Image (cartoon, grey):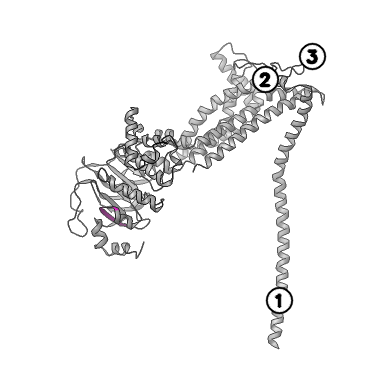
Amino acid sequence: MARPVDGPYIDSAGRGDWPKPLKAETCELSFYYGTRLVLKRVSVPIAECNITALIGPSGCGKSTFLRCFNRMHDLYPGTRYEGAIVLYPDSRNILDREVDPIEVRMRLAMVFQKPNPFPKSVYENVAYGLRVRGVKDRRAIDEKVEQALRSAALWEEVKDRLSALGTSLSGGQQQRLCIARALATDPELLLLDEPTSALDPIATASIEELLQDLKRRVTILIVTHNMQQAARISDWTAFMYLGELVEFGPTKRLFTTPAKKQTEDYITGRFG
Amino acid sequence: MPTVMTEGKAILIDKSGGMEAAGRRRARRRREFVIEGGLLLAALVSVATTVTILAVLLFESLGFFEIVSLLDFFTDTLWTPLFDDPHYGILPLLAGTVVTSVVGLLVAIPVGTVSAIYLSEFASPRMREIIKPTLELLGAVPTVVYGYFALLVVTPALQLLWPDLPGFNMLGPGIVIGIMILPLVISLSEDAMRAVPMVLREGSYAMGATHLETAWRVVVPAATSGIVAAYVLGVSRAVGETMVVAIAAGQNPNLTWNPMEPAATITAYIVQVALGDLPHGSIGYRSIFAAGLVLAVMTFAFNILGHVMRKRFREVY
């Protein structure tokens, strides 16, 4: 699919603060669980090597939105996408029927709400994506594993117990292990679904710091229920409500001078 | 005055009400006690049975071991308790039990694991609805039927491949034992795999893994202890299996590890001897209990091992 027309994607505030260059963008993305419409024509740009945060009250569809990117919904029957998610630089609509979801997932990576390390060693957890991609060279895998664990700020803590079970680490370490696992395959876009909601404040801080570091190399799209977190770490914020995009803009602007009443009510804590 | 009256009345009513409530409470407690006692008795039946069986086994075996030393029992290579020159070496029977069980497991473990993976990860709900009841039916077939199935169908079929195979052998019954324990192995391993949280599968898919890679590299390892528990419980069932081996394996105690040969298992010996007319209290009679004790200890050990494994796998999530 060609790049969609610029038409509908104007800044809701009309201020022209539109991200550039883009790593991805959704174009009128709608999503159905059975007959229930849970995403309504959502169009959001994802700026390259930036952090884009999705905020909104529970049930607003932000996780559903995120999971469209790696076609997670394909795993469940009765789900349907409409519209497009375009991945750049090849301008490919990854929702296209002809696109193999596995091929899409090879380009992206995802970190889940609850740490979900596989019941394997720390090393094998990180090596998983490489093995799935058919990498056989031991030295190449060793190197990638170390690199990914360093990027996830976990190397120093686990370098002496790479053969320990991933599930034996602490919650914060497990989540960083999942981030390392995601980074090992050099994803173009890193999807994070409330990655710190199951963690204590210290572990949360370390992951937030890590994300700041990572964004130099990888585009990040993060769902968070925590507005302070979005304000702290993201460059762009999309506020969603009841399956619709209410407002999108640079984080600083959206949190200081929201253009919509609903956004203002939400970020000032009047609802949600 | 009227106020006092009312107060008195009020107190009276309250008192009688309280007494009534107390009476009701006592009656309820009595009823509950009776019901609870009944439930406890029902539960105790199985415990008492187990304890009694073990006690009888131990008691009768003690009589046996007064005559036969433990050393002979475990080292003698002949089991001929009813001959004029009696030998009481459990090894030939043990070998028969081990060989038939191992053959059974060689069938049940691969077939069972693959079927469980299919049912848990690949089968459509409709397919599962058809396969699961069919499997349960497999478990409901009487073991005598399995015995003759081994003797009259499986062994002749194997003889097409190996014409030298004797009519009584351990291979045929072993295979049939494998088929018999399949439902158990499948349903327990499938339970273990289905208990693996969806978020682990999603994690694997998100890494670009295929359906098969996810099943094999994530779900199966995550369910390992449950699957192993299924195997272990399968072993204890195979070890205790009686009719199939009694019918189709031949009944002569024969110390061999070759499944192509006929042999007797511990269980087969027990039915065989128990069917004859042994005088009560004779050494032959007591040998049944000694053999039974060995069997009980084996299955007991495997059951405990299986339950330990199951518990461990529950603690993972």
Q: Please, what is the three-letter code of the amino acid marked with disc 2?
A: Leu
Give residue B271's position: percent from left, percent from top.
Answer: 72, 25
The residue marked by circle 2 belongs to what chain? B
Which residue corresponds to the image point at 49% horizontal and 32% vertical from the top-left?
B115
Asked if the stretch drawn in magenta spans residue B146, the answer is no
Looking at the rendered image, the disc whose residue lies closer to the viewer, 3 or 1, is 3
- The N terminus of chain B appears in which quarter of the rendering? bottom right
Mark number displayed over residue B84: 3
Give residue B126's position: percent from left, percent from top.
Answer: 47, 39
Q: Please, what is the three-letter code of the amino acid marked with disc 3?
A: Asp
Which residue corresponds to the image point at 72% horizontal and 74% vertical from the top-left?
B15
The verdict on a common chain for dots 2 and 3 is yes
Q: What span is in magenta?
A: A233-241
Secondary element under disc 1, as helix, strand or loop, is helix
Asked if the stretch drawn in magenta spans residue A240, the answer is yes
The residue carrying pointer 1 sits among few (fewer than 14), some (14 to 19) or many (20 or more) residues within 10 Å by Cα, namely: few
The residue furthest bottom is B1
Q: In terms of depth relative to the viewer, which is nearer, B155 or B187? A: B187
The residue carrying pointer 2 sits among few (fewer than 14), some (14 to 19) or many (20 or more) residues within 10 Å by Cα, namely: many
Mark number displayed over residue A117: none
- Find disc 1 in the rendering and name its residue: B13
Spatial CA distance of label 3 from label 1 is: 89 Å
Secondary element under disc 2, as helix, strand or loop, is helix
Earlier sequence position, callout 3 versus callout 1: 1
Earlier sequence position, callout 1 versus callout 2: 1
Q: In terms of depth relative to the viewer, which is nearer, B228 or A82? A: B228
The residue marked by circle 3 belongs to what chain? B
Earlier sequence position, callout 2 versus callout 3: 3
Q: Please, what is the three-letter code of the amino acid marked with disc 1?
A: Ile
- Find disc 2 in the rendering and name its residue: B91
